Amino acid sequence: MPLSEAFPLPFSLKQQPPSSIRARAGSIALGLAEAGLGLSACNRLYRQVRSDGTMAGFVHQALKTLAIDYLVEPQDLARIPASGPCVVIANHPYGGVEGLILFDLVSRIRPDFKVMGNHLLGRLPALRSHLIAVDPFGSDSSVRTNIAPLRQALKSLKQGELLIIFPAGEVSSHQSKETGVVDPQWNDSAARIIRRSNVPVVPIFFPGHNGPLFQLAGKIHPRLRTALLPRMLLGQRHQVKQVVVGQLISPRNCGDFATDRELTDYLRLRTYALGARTATPLAGPTIPTPATTAPVIRAVDKNLLQQELAHLPTTQMLTENDEFLVCYADAGQIPWVLNEIGRLRELTFREVGEGSGKNCDLDRFDEGYTHLFLWHKQHQEVVGAYRLGHIDRILSTIGSKGLYTSTLFAMKPALLKELHAGLELGRSFVRPEYQRSFAPLLLLWKGIGHYLVRYPHYRYLFGPVSISREYSLQARGLITTALTEHYRVNELACLVKPRTPVTFKPLMLAGLDLKQQSFLKEIDHLSALVSDMEADGKGIPVLLRHYLNLGGQILAFNRDPDFSDVIDGLLLVDLFKTDKKQLQRYMGKEGYAGYLTYHRRPLKNCA
């Protein structure tokens, strides 16, 4: 029996009043033990708590007595549903403080909630009405004992209440050299409840953990570590704790997992990923800050832009709507427009920690490439652009050195032969003031679709897609790890070598190897985990997601020292393998039919 199971209300080692000399001596020894373990101090503090007898009043006053406060961002607080069934899961770093904080936090939002917690909490009368008592100690009888609480939890959710669970059951402790101090393996019970009740889940992360004494005690014996919990509670006095609330995980996402263990690992990762917002980097190289940048050139006169646009043949107008027009042109047709594109590229890329650092982002490749650009009809200005390289033309006239991609990756002749019927895409942007709407980017992609209809012999879309410095090291490591593991086309990847390789150490999170998590092959799950890591909640880059949705595969990753050390993933999209609906969205139904007719074959997955 754990030492703590012998504690009478609320915190004591003594069972009965001493009745003999030996008993009195034992009582003195127990009193000294209580003082050393912090039980006496906890009792004194407990007697100082003045509340109205309610759970909310008790935990509020307990935190006040302990002089413990906590910080949670308003947008995080808003993620906890104010009504309806929901499961809140959290890590268990301290053993007491996080429970008080979570009870207080949830009670500020709604009164109808229950907590699956250690049955010892039932010794605190104010908590009993909200407690579903379980035995977390893993004895032979625990499984039988916990059947009734599991049923009670399901009933609570069926009634529309919120349920708080600490799936670890035990306090975080030192697990290994690689993982450090984290929760032990989570119990599958939380996942079982979530799968059966089909309710949303909110993950919550508490940074930090108990100190070296606690960890050392656990190495001697786990029950000694348990006995130190009151002392650890006292050590948290006069502190401010941070609380990080993750995004709501829908029942549909939880339903993607075949077993309780798979879902448990997923929920654990979604919880611990939130710690990346407050922790030091998990792995990865240190990215230097950009060199001193030059002032960007002045905007080109709109009259000059309008004149060049007016002289373009109507056949080079690809698509339009009421607001925008998409055109394409060679560099010689649009010298002023191209200058404006270079200016806007540099401005836009600098917004996300990229950019060349020069006064205008134009290079030697712009002269030989086709430029597809988005024009705002009313404002008479360039809104965004893509750079298109015709691989067949470039290889036949200049050779591989004429491809921008060749500056980042060394490609063997066998790969270039395979990509002869391909377009190299790159240097895409939508200027910042237009990024609030998805419409400009969508119209650019439709422009590429219509361009393919005009030139249907192109089968491949090929080129680098950036993961900017705006992403944390942890997120960049996760993206590169997941895509290398699940999206790399190995038969072609062996034909490519990055000029400056990206080296991330194997990523461990909460004791789990991210390379072994099969759910990361799903774009939505990968993006959600990245979003958990990022303070602003952004998922994987929009362009990267777009190409993956088109069936894109990764060949390699490279770090570009000439472009703010951005990480470029070399992506390949085989349009013969792209979903029919995706192609119709960008080519139009008639254009798609024409593309099929040209190739005289039904495309895979497009029947």
Image: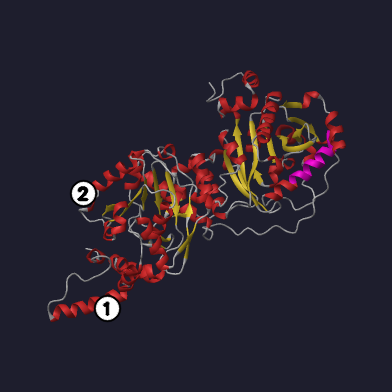
Residue 144's label in the rendered image is 2
Report the mark closest to the observer, 1 or 2.
1
Q: Give the image location of residue 108, x and y in percent.
A: 44, 52
In magenta segment, residue 338: yes
Location of the N terminus by quadrant is bottom left
User: Could you tell me the amino acid type at mark 1?
Assistant: Leu
- Residue under numbered circle 1: 32
User: Could you tell me the amino acid type at mark 2?
Assistant: Arg
- Report if residue 174 is visible in the image: no
- Between 355 and 168, which is closer to the camera in this rendering? 168
In magenta segment, residue 23: no
- The answer to which quarter of the image holds residue 281 is bottom right
Q: Give the image location of residue 532, x and y in percent.
A: 51, 49
Relative to 395, residue 100 above or below: below
Q: Residues within 10 Å of mark 1 (few under 14, many from 20)?
A: some
Q: What stretch of residues is rendered in magenta?
A: 333-345
Q: Give the image location of residue 533, x and y in percent.
A: 52, 51
- The answer to which quarter of the image holds residue 172 is bottom left
- Report if residue 324 is visible in the image: yes
